[in-house]
Amino acid sequence: MIKKTVTVKNPAGIHARPASVIVQEITRFKSDFHIHMYGYRINGKSILGLLTLAAEQGAELELEMDGPDEEQAMEAMVTLFNNGFKVEE
């Protein structure tokens, strides 16, 4: 299991479009994906779970990967967060 802290960079935070992009990207991997924020732990492969976080710009999230391709999955998620989820605001 690996963990890494990331910051939400896009101005609108994690709303429907970024949540959809995250789920599309992470479902390519077999590893389990969870996100920790303010004491909550959600399934990162669930759009509903992502939306319940209501993560705003500047929010720090801890990403947790566990599985056979965890390194590649973590790299993909960190890149996605650093690029603002490939979503134009």
Image (cartoon, rainbow, N blue to C red):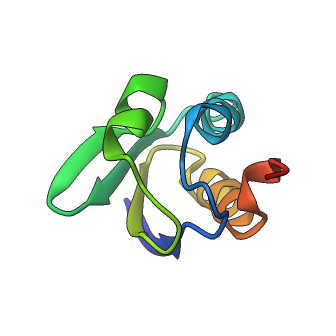
User: Please, is residue 42 above or below residue 6 in the view?
Assistant: above
Give the total of numbered labels.
Answer: 0
* Nearest the eye: 42 or 11: 11
Residue drawn at the location 73% of the way across and 61% of the way down: 84
User: Please, is residue 65 above or below residue 57 in the view?
Assistant: above
Residue drawn at the location 44% of the way across and 39% of the way down: 44
Outermost residue, left side = 39
Give the percent coordinates (x, y) of residue 64: 39, 57
Residue drawn at the location 42% of the way across and 35% of the way down: 51
* Nearest the eye: 87 or 75: 87
On the rendered structure, is 40 left or right of 20? left
Residue drawn at the location 18% of the way across and 51% of the way down: 40
* Nearest the eye: 29 or 77: 77
The N terminus: image quadrant = bottom left
User: Please, is residue 37 above or below residue 68 in the view?
Assistant: below
Residue 9: quadrant of the picture: bottom right
Kindly tell me whether residue 46 is visible in this rendering: no
On the rendered structure, is 81 left or right of 51? right
Give the percent coordinates (x, y) of residue 4: 46, 72
On the rendered structure, is 70 left or right of 25? left
Give the percent coordinates (x, y) of residue 14: 54, 48
Give the percent coordinates (x, y) of residue 27: 62, 28
Residue 25: quadrant of the picture: top right
Kindly tell me whether residue 48 is visible in this rendering: yes
